[in-house]
Image (cartoon, grey):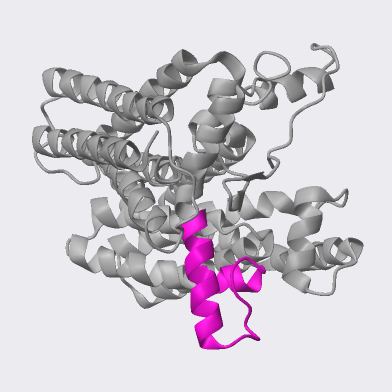
Amino acid sequence: MDQQTIILTDIVFILLHLFVFLFNYTITSRKVFQPAVLFSFVWFSIILLHFILRHTILDQLYPVGVETYMILFVGVVTFSLGSLLVTGYNQLKNTEVLPSDQSDLTLSLTLRIIFLGIVVIGLPLYIQASIRVFLASQIDDFFQGLRNELSYGDEDIGPTKYLISLSFVVFAISYYSFVKEKGKLNRVLFITSFLVTVVYALLATGRTYFFIILSIYLGISYFHKKNFSLKKYGLLLIGFLLVFILFGMLYGKGGDLKDSLKDNLQASSETTGVYLVSSITALDNEIGRNVKARYPGEYTLRFFIKTGQQLNLVSDKKVSSLVSDFVFVPYPTNVFTFYSPYIRDFGKMYAWLMIGLFGALHTWIYHRSARTKNLRNTLYYSFLLFPLLMSFFQDQYMSLFSFWLQIMFFIELFLFLDVYFKVRKDKVIQS
């Protein structure tokens, strides 16, 4: 295609995504955190940003073809349909507000301290395991060596890796309790859990982990903070982006703390731009090469295949790595948006079907959260903001299935023990 046709194609699909976003925004009574609105806004923003950056700081970035644009657009429409169908059903069947779980107002303080204590006590063990992994990398820089070994080496963090997902749940519960009752003790527990979770996320060496912290904060704030303001949280996102760039320097991904401010700004701007928009071009590259899975479900069903192999229920197959090979567009990238593993496994229809189901799931939990405002629904909504917000980057639904099982386990374990602690306390008071 000539340059004018490419630009015209870009503008047409930007306008189509803008239309879907405005339609969802209007039909949902301007509820910004309604999943269909949020998802369509994310994709409108990323495609617009792709267009802007390709004509500015990423002027060598390859254009996106019509087929890829259609896959992305139909995906947004499918997600919106799944979401709006659930919204319509919800309006027909559930017009009343469900009673909130009053026990949430007094979550067991003892249990919250115990859960926080576990991640605090476990942190030195996690640091020790991280040092062991770093030494195995034989790289001088700590964070670069740690990341390289975790991504491509044979050394593993070990059982302490489960403390990462637990720390996210502890942080979410601590923040929820602090928002509900802003006492001094709740403030201390919240700040402590936040700092501990940041350390876990930093040592995990994946900047996407910080999006989980952001998702938790946004989801809980949306439903439970009376002074929730889009302007205020817009500024928060700008601050988050600056921290994101800083951590990128620590990991050796865009800039170096030893370089000058000018050099760092130039390098980090380009790297952040590649991080945000190169995945769309990488997907276009992959579709052009017609990349397919070696066997059905290799990428999206890897958790079930791996589990089946361990139970001797499935024949031995090479399980794919979560870390993809790099391609050059011409900037190096190894992320291919949400759609890549689904298209590789079973094609475009499968990808659209799954994104529609995820849209329905998001919205079902969203409406339950809005109606009950209890801890369980609020936490699930907040955690699920993460794969939604990261859909432009890579799949965080089925690819992280084991992580979501861990999150569910820790949430339900806390809720179960919370009831047990309260029943036990009532019996002590009665006796």
Query: Relative to residue 91, is residue 100 depicted above or below?
Result: below
Point 65% across, 20% down: residue: 292
Comparing 96 with 404, the one in front is 404
Where on the picture, by quarter, is residue 86?
top left
Where on the picture, by quarter, is residue 121?
bottom right
- Position of residue 308 in the picture relative to residue 419 (left or right): right
- Position of residue 227 in the picture relative to residue 347 (left or right): left
Magenta stretch encompasses residue 215: no
Q: Which residues are magenta?
A: 245-274
Query: Relative to residue 34, is residue 261 depicted above or below?
Result: below
Point 61% across, 26% down: residue: 289
**Percent x, y of residue 334:** 63, 45
**Percent x, y of residue 193:** 52, 67
- Position of residue 282 in the picture relative to residue 322 (left or right): left
Where on the picture, by quarter, is residue 138?
bottom right
Q: Is residue 365 visible to us here?
A: yes
